[in-house]
Image: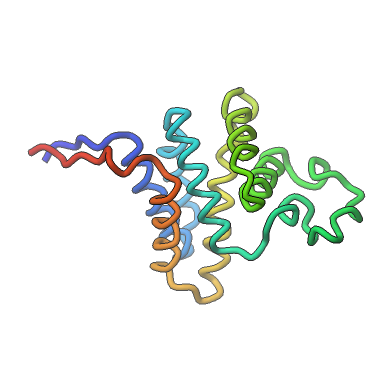
Amino acid sequence: MKHVAAADQLAQVHLQAAVAQAALGEFEEAGRRLDAVLALGPEDLLAMARTAAAYIDSITLVTGNEFATGKPAANASDQSVSLDERVPPARALTLRLMSAWSSKDPESFDALFAAAAGNAAGASHVRDLFVYALEWTENKAASASNPQVMVKSLCKAMNEHGPSPWRWTRPKG
């Protein structure tokens, strides 16, 4: 059978497999699968980033400003050290992306992601959002979550925010 899957189709399968592997503790192998996701064009990569953000948002109780400050919104003003001084640049971008996503601000999420993916320095930071999803997966699975539940949660996020499901084609024999 000849392989004819589109790049976005392969990326979706690789992300699902990466979540399953991370849930089983195979973090390094899971991380290697992210190259297929990061090779996507801008539109599909943004859709996969939305998928990752929706997935993270579904498996964690952290929301909004808590991602960027590490404190509930009421205590956020007590933060004296900036986010950029506390974490590496890639993680700072990821936390800002998650703060925008979980605050129900998709326009800010899209703008932050597009700005990062659109320049050479930021493009290297984009991977961290997907790594962060795998880290949360590994963390949740370690506390006895069923790996199937993690993949199902990712698939739900992918159906809502990922690349169009209508472009799937069957392999030609």
x and y, in percent, of residue 147 in the image? 42, 67
Quarter of the rendering occupied by the C terminus: top left
- Where 18 falls versus 169 (above or below)? below
**Can you name the residue that lies furthest to the bottom here?**
144
Residue 75 spot, x, y in % from top left: 86, 60
Q: What residue is rendered at 49% in x and 52% in y?
A: 28
Q: Position of residue 39 (x, y in %)?
A: 43, 32
Please indicate whether residue 167 sits to the left or right of residue 73 in the image.
Answer: left
- Residue 142 or 16: which is nearer the viewer? 16
Question: Which color scheme does this rendered protein use?
Answer: rainbow
User: What residue is drawn where x is 66% and y is 46%?
Assistant: 100
In this rendering, the answer to whether 92 lies above or below 56 is above
* Residue at the far left in the pictured view: 173
Determine the residue positioned at 55% across, 40% down.
Answer: 127
Which is nearer the eye, 1 or 8? 8
How far from the left and from the top, in percent, is residue 129?
Answer: 58, 45
Q: How many marks?
A: 0
Q: Is residue 104 left or right of residue 77?
A: left
Q: Quadrant of residue 72?
A: bottom right
Image quarter in which the N terminus is found = top left
Q: At x 58% / y 65%, what residue is drawn? A: 139
